């Protein structure tokens, strides 16, 4: 299986690097996120392909075990720096909001950043098994709408 081509826009990369440098988050997650930035091709926001996941993208995902979800990839809450992870694979999906916030400082958020529609990742679950999660659609992407400074 070939490794997905990661593409991240320059503004997102700069903001994410500042988040990592702030050292207000889990060191392991920050290291994983920084590794993601190093692996990625960084492009200007106006050249960012509309089929790749960027910050504040509204996504439709399907998990092999967890089913269908709509998420918005976001930064931690700036007021509190809090990053509440989305409970992917929750047994009570009706309790999740229609478009659940997914923090970039989470394993799933890190794994999705820069992927293209149709690509998939394998996410370990708490029960020791894995969930294969596919990006089905990007329902809204700020760069596609010319929204570069959100």
Image (cartoon, rainbow, N blue to C red):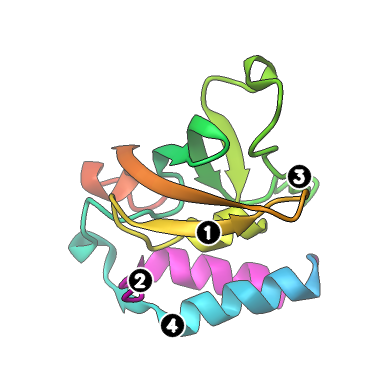
Residue placed under numbered mark 4 in the picture: 39
Range of the magenta residues?
A: 1-24
Q: Is residue 68 magenta?
A: no
Q: For the residues marked 4 and 1, what is the alpha-carbon distance in whole angstroms?
A: 18 Å
Q: Which mark is residue 122?
A: 1
Looking at marks 2 and 1 on the same chain, the residue that comes earlier in the sequence is marked by 2
Q: Is residue 150 visible?
A: no
* Mark sitting on residue 48: none
Q: Are marks 2 and 4 in contact (CB under 8 Å)?
A: yes
- Where residue 146 appears, as percent x and y from the top left, is 24, 47
Q: How far apart, in angstroms, are the residues tagged by discs 2 and 1?
A: 16 Å
Counting residues from the start of the chain, the first of labels 3 and 4 encountered is 4
Rendered image: mark on residue 79: 3
Looking at the image, residue 24 lies above or below residue 145: below
Q: Nearer the viewer, residue 67 or 80?
A: 67
The residue sitting at 55% across, 47% down in the picture is 74
Q: Nearer the viewer, mark 2 or mark 3?
A: 2
Dot 2 corresponds to which residue?
6
What residue is rendered at 33% in x and 56% in y? 119
Q: Nearer the viewer, mark 3 or mark 4?
A: 4
* Secondary element at image label 2: loop
Going from N to C along the chain, the mark reached first, 2 or 3, is 2
Q: Residue at x 32, y 41 (%)?
A: 138
50 left or right, relative to 7 = left
Q: CA distance from mark 3 to mark 4?
A: 30 Å
Is the residue marked by circle 3 packed among few (<14), some (14-19), or many (20+) residues within 10 Å? Answer: few
């Amino acid at each position: 299986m070939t490794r997905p081509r990661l593409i991240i826009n320059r503004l997102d990369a700069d903001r994410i690097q500042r988040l990592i440098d702030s050292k207000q988050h889990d060191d392991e997650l920050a290291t994983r996120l920084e590794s993601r930035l190093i692996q990625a091709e960084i492009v200007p926001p106006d050249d960012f392909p509309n089929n790749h996941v960027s910050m504040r993208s509204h996504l439709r995902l399907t998990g092999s075990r967890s089913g269908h979800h709509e998420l918005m990839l976001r930064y931690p809450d700036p007021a509190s720096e809090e990053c509440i992870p989305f409970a992917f694979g929750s047994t009570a999906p009706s309790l999740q909001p229609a478009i659940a916030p997914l923090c970039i400082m989470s394993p799933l958020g890190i794994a999705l950043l820069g992927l293209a529609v149709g690509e998939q990742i394998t996410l370990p679950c708490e029960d020791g098994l894995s969930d294969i999660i596919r990006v089905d659609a990007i329902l809204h992407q700020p760069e596609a709408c010319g929204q570069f400074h959100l």
